[in-house]
Amino acid sequence: MTGGAAPTTAGELLYLVRTGQATTRKALQTVTGLSRSTLVGRLEQLQAAGLLTEGGQEGSTGGRPARYLRFDDRHAVVLAASVDTMHTEAAVTDLSGRRLARRGGALRVADGPEPVLDAIAGWFDALLAESGRGAGEVAGVGLSVPGPVEPGVARVSRPPIMPGWDGYPIGAHLGTRFAAPVLVDNDANLMALGEHRSTYPDSPAFVLVKVSTGIGAGLVIGGEVYRGIDGGAGDIGHIRLAGFPDARCMCGSYGCLAAVASGGALAARLTEQGLPTVSGSGVRERIDAGEPAAVRLAEIAGRQVGEVLATVVSVVNPEVLVIAGDLAEPSFVAGVREVLYRHALPRATRNLRVEIGGRGGDAAVSGAVATVVESVFAPAAVDRRLAGARQKSS
């Protein structure tokens, strides 16, 4: 870089290309201030490693037209899966997140880590074969789980709805199988990241709330997921509401938002009313079928969630709030909007957009892929990879 800063590394050049900030040699030279010979040498390293390709031409206003540089998003693949309480989505993607093969099916997270992870690994093997890719091409594995995860550690921490998973070495279990780094995060975080990257990339403050069997939120601030000091940010399902002393939550406390307004809580209430319902997805099925009791309960739950979100919006002041998960449907979201806009200050909501998102699996898979790519191809990681390649060749 110019101005006395350290010279731009090859990894930083790749980052500029991958993020679209500079996509020709001339643009890179302008941004970084590198000499032509230094720039060429570093680009050649990236090309030799299969990370960078060059082709096509930009329009010319005179002189030789510049050729575009492009991150080679097909030279490796990502394995990604979104684990929910009753269902899992899995995919093999290229490095831009394009699905090469995908699969979804019933997997109960309550069955424990080994059966679930072994099933997912089997799916990954089949998906790699279906896509014509090999295990040696896997850049990384991304996994979304419905519980709190310590940042930088592929383990869940005291998850209320994941019995047997506390502290289990997910990274070691899958990393040994595929000889690749494994990144694990909470489902609301990865859903938020996936939605932000695909639909709201320019939003400086973005919140996604997942309301399914449980309730959680993901925050993307300044383009990055905000996780808090140990992964607890966004855990709004365990904020306690007044007036529900008998609503016992799976965390052991009473009156938690999740114990009152989640899909699991509504399923229990419908079952008590003679309408047997197992989970948040079952509640959604009854709502979609027009069951009056389910619609009424969803509206009430939306108001209760809106009460908590009024505080979240006042603290974070987001531009976009997405309601996602099994209860992301009009009657529930109408209840959220009704209370949110009534209880939050007008200044906090005057530029706020409240949107309905999907049910979650696809966005979580996208977020898992983005997490893997942004970690594995971060500038420092790329520089270490190139240095290792130079040492092997010397």
Image: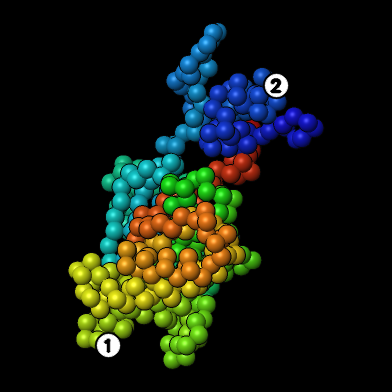
Secondary structure under tag 1 reads helix
Q: Amino acid at mark 1?
A: Glu
In the image, residue 220 lies at what x, y percent? 54, 55
Of the 4 image quadrants, the one containing the C terminus is top right
Q: Is residue 76 left or right of residue 380?
A: left
Of the 4 image quadrants, the one containing the N terminus is top right
Is 250 located above or below residue 140 in the figure? below
Q: Amino acid at mark 2?
A: Ser
Q: Nearer the viewer, residue 224 or 181?
A: 224
Is 212 located above or below residue 371 in the figure? below
Of label 2 and label 1, which has the lower sequence position? 2
Say which residue appears at 51% left-offset and 70% top-offset. 343
Q: Is residue 196 left or right of residue 103?
A: right
Secondary structure under tag 2 reads loop
Taking the image as drawn, is residue 333 in sight? yes
CB under 8 Å between discs 2 and 1: no
Which residue sits furthest bottom?
A: 246
Is 143 located above or below residue 7 in the figure? below
Say which residue appears at 53% left-offset and 17% top-offset. 66
Residue mark closest to the camera, 2 vs 1: 1
Say which residue appears at 66% left-offset and 19% top-offset. 36
Crowding at mark 1 (Cα within 10 Å: few <14, some 14-19, many 20+): few
Q: Identify the residue position indicated by label 2 in the image.
A: 35
In the image, residue 193 lies at what x, y percent? 48, 53
How far is mark 2 from mark 1, CA to CA?
73 Å
| Disc sitting over residue 272 in the figure | 1
Taking the image as drawn, is residue 361 in sight? no
